Amino acid sequence: MSIQTVPTQPFADQKPGTSGLRKKVRVFQQPHYLQNFVQSIFDTLEIPAGATLTLGGDGRYYNKEAIQVIIKMAAANGFAKVLVGQNGILSTPAASNIIRKYQTFGGIILSASHNPGGPDDDFGIKYNTSNGGPAPEKITDAIFVNSTQIQTYKIVDDLPEIDLSSIGITTLDGFTVEVIDSVRDYADLMQSMFDFAAIKRWLAEGHSLKFDAMHAVTGPYAKEVFVNRLGAPATSLMNCEVSENFGGGHPDPNLTYAEELVTIAYGQQAPDFSAASDGDGDRNMILGNRFFVTPSDSLALIAANAKLIPAYADGLSGVARSMPTSGAVDRVAAKLGIDCYETPTGWKFFGNLMDAGKVTLCGEESFGTGSDHVREKDGLWAVLCWLNLLAATGESVESLVRKHWQQYGRNVYSRHDYEAVPTAPAQAVMSHVRQQFESLPGQVFGSYTVHTVDDFSYTDPIDSSISTGQGLRILFACGSRVVIRLSGTGTEGATIRVYLEAYTEDPVQQQLDAQDALAELITVSHQISQLPVLTGRQQPTVIT
Ligand code: VG1
Ligand code: CO
């Protein structure tokens, strides 16, 4: 095994975003581009002798090629072993589990999550540390600095291609590659956490389930968990064959992109429960019979009923949500007498809290929910939480949610995304709001009075690191709020996200459609941000 040191030059655009580095496939295919970034990751780490790297991805186009390159670079950079999922597949939560279960030094996950895949679409790469979670900002910042200074990378070019299709071990000069079952460890973990017997009974009683893997990574996991282990009929699954371009769609489980499932869930013979997950399996969408559960409500409801799930029978140590996520879970935490933390957007901010035992459950409004069983959000875990709650209570999805609102009030919530906006007008919207920080408080817009306006910043309670510029918040006197931020995962222009939230205890208001209930707040947000004028966009691309 001979190590080559290859001269290279820095690329200026390798700054990781909310969740790793995401670019068009063609950007990654430029000579040295992938290698530079991987070397920048390795240069950030102090790799001890005997270290193992976990490696896998969501199966999108370029996954297999990238895996072969990374194996060769891991060999050259001092790793003793690489654990790689069969066919290069590991869902993001499964990768997190592998890192933790086998105590590997860290992991590289190849995914652009919910972004489309294929030669003209997106690819992504991120590093997870030994706790199984996404590298914190101090590491991603250091990776970026390295990427701007890199002059060489190391690779074992003559290492033979690894056959990823069959489980087994290849060893060369003390360097080992082990191709592992992508699914089994994860399915075992799920089975250890949930009441599979109760869910089986619920299904056997004639309740119906529909799960849409959106042609993405959870297909094989869903087959093993829902069909093989829980006995659901194979017809419960749709789009469960992993495809390199996700069947040409956006593997993004929301009301717009999961239209096929939504049509079924709102159709004549709607299943009792429908769910979907995203490209890399860390997101979830939950639907009842003609009923959509917002991710913020889902988090709150799982928290409120956690004791019905075996893994959480002893209760929760605390909960956390990202800043734009609705305050529904805060109300549950207050009732339970546990702490609730508010973090910036991105799962990497939950890791310290979970490692310190401060929180058990975490969630984001962006269809991400999870717990300390791994250090990533976990789509199938969220689906199993719901199935467990349905089985334990015998209630329907809709009645569980409506009862929750009766008890806690409803945080009416919606997110409006304006995708692929040119960067300049997107920045102009942000600046326009920033310029009004001083003047807005006290101003009245219809029935809303502005209370405070700020740019969210966060001091990590565990390591005191500070993250600034995490989203503009317009907080109203009545408790309603508008949050505006730019996406850190898009690969085309800018995506403006506008998050809208109002709280109501009025049972009549609670029944309204969110867009109707939030109509005035939406108008007020346009008045303040001037978004339609500055961007020329009259309607959002996606409403969730
Ligand atoms: C989005 C979501 C954020 C999530 C991130 C990664 O980020 O808003 O909540 O953590 O995607 O999710 P942004 O910066 O585009 O708003 V995933 O499933 O893409 O790993
Ligand atoms: Co994802």
Image (tube, helix red, strand yellow):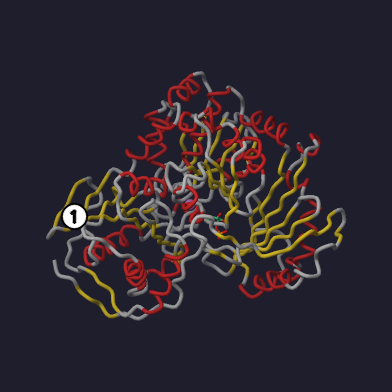
Residue extending farthest to the left is: 173
Which residue shows up at 42% across the image and 62% down it? 123
Res 427 → quadrant: bottom right
Name the residue nearer the viewer: 309 or 234: 309
Amino acid type assigned to the residue bearing label 1 in the image:
Thr
Which residue shows up at 39% across the image and 40% down it? 221
Name the residue nearer the viewer: 189 or 384: 189
Q: In this view, does 304 lie to the left or right of 232?
A: right
In this view, 376 is above or below 275: below
Name the residue nearer the viewer: 56 or 309: 309
In this view, 225 is above or below 56: above
- Dot 1, crowdedness within 10 Å: few (<14), some or many (≥20)? some
Quarter of the image where the N terminus is located: bottom left
Image position, residue 517 (x, y; %): 78, 46
Image position, residue 336 (x, y; %): 62, 35
Instruction: Report helix, strand or loop for mark 1.
Output: strand
* Residue underneath mark 1: 176
Which residue shows up at 35% across the image and 68% down it? 44
In this view, 305 is above or below 425: above
Name the residue nearer the viewer: 338 or 55: 338
Count of picture labels: 1
Which residue shows up at 45% across the image and 47% down it? 281
Q: In this view, does 338 lie to the left or right of 233?
A: right
Image position, residue 28 (x, y; %): 39, 69
